[in-house]
Image (cartoon, coloured by chain):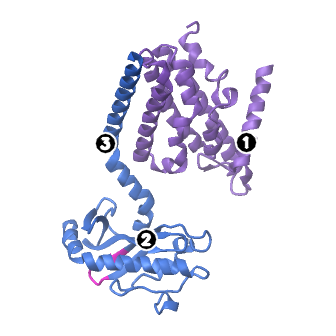
Amino acid sequence: MREIIKMIVVLTVLSSFSGGLLAAIRGGTKEKIEYQQLVFVKGPAIRNILEGCSNDPIVDRFKIKDGDIERSFFVGVFDGKANTVAFEGIGKGFGGDIGLMVGIKMDDDKIVGMGVTTHSETPGIGTKAQTDPKFPNQFKGLSAIEPCKVKPDGGGIDAISGATVTSRGVCGGVTNAADIYKRLKPQIAEKIKAFN
Amino acid sequence: MAKSITQEFVKGLWDEIPPFRLVLGLCPVLAVTKSVENGLGMGMAVVFVLVCSNMLVSLLRNIIPSKVRIACFIVIIATFVIVVELLMQAYTYSLFLKLGIFIPLIVVNCVVLGRAEAFAYKNGVVASIADGLGICVGFTLSLTALGALREVFGSGTFLGMSVFGPSFQPFTFMVEAPGAFVCLGLMLCMMNLAGNK
């Protein structure tokens, strides 16, 4: 009996000690990890979209509550004015969700850039949406108010040959981002003032 | 306790060098040694985990009941592995992305558990730290050597710098999984040849 109690006590103390240690370290590194993840996973796309901005969009970010989820917005300062935001939209692709970043200029509600961040599309075909700059460049200058569509669906985007589903998914993602933008525009405009 | 501290340390460098002599912990050895950087990074992570876990196990060896010792070892090792994982995510994120799943898998690396069971549980703190350091330095050296060999021939670079110039046609076989087995086998063979003299 004593042996069993000893085993239980030792294991319990050891586990709770390790739990406490891990919680402390997790708390200490949380912000740093979040920043690193943004830099490495979304950073390249954000930088590409907000090319030429004078600030670090990954540092200048804010969050807005949209229903149950919190969305992150990255601010781009151009000519001394914080007038551009980049944020995430999600579309349905061929192999699953396509996550993408869309940058929108607040002054005229136009898309300044788009980049795919996460996807599980067919390598060499659907992945062109991320790797071939020709495709994302088509979104530049489009209005963020109207839904975005590929040509066969009556829109203005040339689909990637052989990857219509992916192209449609990306358009869906951009439309999704545009919907978020339309819904949250007053709050975004309010928050972005702080970065001027 | 016949051996001195120095002997405990030195044995890990040749006599009991993990991947070649003990032939333990081969999973990370084969999988991550695509480049010098990966090998070195993995080695460093293991150094931290093994030295800390050896120290703690040896400190607690009189408290830990022998019936649940493996469970206790795993708790201790897992804690340090998560610490390493969090720290790597926070400070060397690109390396963390490359090593990926093999960082959490240090928990089940038999080198770490093996040293806790075979050495730290029976020996004093200082000897355990020396043993851990020795084994780890050996492990890191082997990983780095294997990584160097595979990187130099497989991609023509060393730590990302070009070695042979642009005309070199990389021997891609070396950075693939079969190349890892061939390399390890050749190095083991060399070590046995050198040891038999």
Evaluate whether label 3 is on the same chain as label 2: yes
- List x then y, in percent, for residue A150: 49, 87
Segment tinted magenta in the rendering: A103-109
Residue type at mark 3? Gly
Q: Give coordinates of residue A68: x percent, y percent.
A: 28, 65
Q: Residue sitting at 33 percent across and 79 percent down?
A: A179
Q: Secondary structure at mark 1?
A: helix
Q: Do the dots labelled 1 and 2 sit on one chain? A: no
Residue A89 x %, y %:
39, 72
Q: Amino acid at mark 2?
A: Leu
Occupied quadrant, residue A80: bottom left
Residue A31 appears anywhere in the view: yes
Asked whether, in this view, residue A105 is left or right of residue A196, the answer is right
Q: Which residue is mark 2?
A: A100
Question: In the figure, residue A174 lies in which quadrant?
Answer: bottom left
Distance between the Cα atoms at labels 3 and 2?
Answer: 30 Å
Which chain appears blue? A
Q: Chain of mark 1?
A: B
The disc at residue A128 is none
Crowd tier of the residue under label 2, counting other residues whose Cα lies within 10 Å: few below 14, some 14–19, many 20 or above: many
Taking the spot 42% from the left edge, 76% from the top edge, the residue there is A173
Magenta span has A107?
yes
| Residue under label 1 | B181
Judging from the image, what secondary structure is the residue with disc 3 in? helix
Q: Residues within 10 Å of mark 1 (few under 14, many from 20)?
A: some
Please, which residue is most extreme toward the bottom here?
A154
Where does the N terminus of chain A fall, quadrant-wise? top left
Q: The chain drawn purple is chain what?
A: B
Is label 2 in a helix, a strand or a loop?
Answer: strand
Which chain is disc 3 placed on?
A
- The residue beneath circle 3 is A28
Circle 2 chain: A
